[in-house]
Image (cartoon, helix red, strand yellow):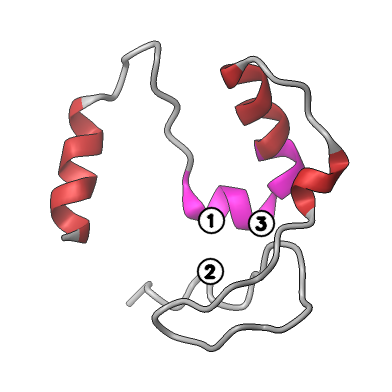
């Protein structure tokens, strides 16, 4: 499923209506990336955009009460 979605996204590279955001960039530089994304979609950046709840993924349970972008898994997929 992931490979299929990634290939579909690559087809849209260069399309002015599409902004590619790398997970690593978002997690490691959330404020910068959210500024760029906000400008791209035409909304004002608000600092509360950085306070997203950390919700379970396929590899870990909910981090109850934690907010922001967890960086602990950013390099786990690299072999």
Task: Between residue 64 and residue 34, name the one nearer to us.
Answer: 64
| Residue 51 figure quarter | bottom right
Q: Residues within 10 Å of mark 3 (few under 14, many from 20)?
A: some
User: Which residue lies at the image location 67% right of the left edge and 26% below the top edge?
Assistant: 38
Q: Residues within 10 Å of mark 2 (few under 14, many from 20)?
A: some
Where is mark 2, residue-wise? 74
Q: Identify the secondary structure beneath mark 1.
A: helix
Q: Identify the secondary structure beneath mark 2.
A: loop
**Majority secondary structure of magenta residues:** helix
> Whole-percent x and y of residue 54?
65, 71
Count of marks overlaid on the render? 3
> Decide: marks 1, 3 in contact (CB < 8 A)?
yes
Mark 2 → mark 3, Cα distance in angstroms? 8 Å
User: Which residue lies at the image location 61% right of the left edge and 29% below the top edge?
Assistant: 37
Q: Residues within 10 Å of mark 1 (few under 14, many from 20)?
A: few
Q: Identify the secondary structure beneath mark 3.
A: helix
Task: Choose the circle earlier in sequence order: 1 or 2.
Answer: 1
User: Which residue lies at the image location 32% right of the left edge and 14% below the top edge?
Assistant: 15
Q: Is residue 21 left or right of residue 31?
A: left
Q: Which residues are magenta?
A: 22-33
Where is mark 3, residue-wise? 28
> Whole-percent x and y of residue 47?
86, 42
> Decide: marks 2, 3 in contact (CB < 8 A)?
yes
> Decide: marks 1, 2 in contact (CB < 8 A)?
yes
Tell me: residue 42, above or below residue 4: above
User: Which residue lies at the image location 77% right of the left edge and 22% below the top edge?
Assistant: 44
Where is mark 1, residue-wise? 24
Marking on residue 78:
none
The answer to if 45 sits in the magenta stretch is no
Q: Is residue 14 left or right of residue 64?
A: left
> Whole-percent x and y of residue 65?
78, 79
**Residue found farthest to the right:** 47
């Amino acid at each position: 499923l992931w490979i299929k979605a990634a290939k579909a996204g690559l087809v849209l590279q260069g399309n002015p209506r599409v902004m590619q955001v790398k997970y690593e960039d978002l997690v490691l530089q959330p404020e910068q990336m959210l500024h760029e994304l906000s400008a791209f979609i035409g909304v004002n950046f608000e600092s509360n955009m950085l306070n997203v709840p950390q919700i379970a993924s396929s590899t870990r349970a909910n981090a109850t009460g934690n907010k922001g972008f967890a960086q602990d898994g950013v390099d786990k997929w690299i072999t």
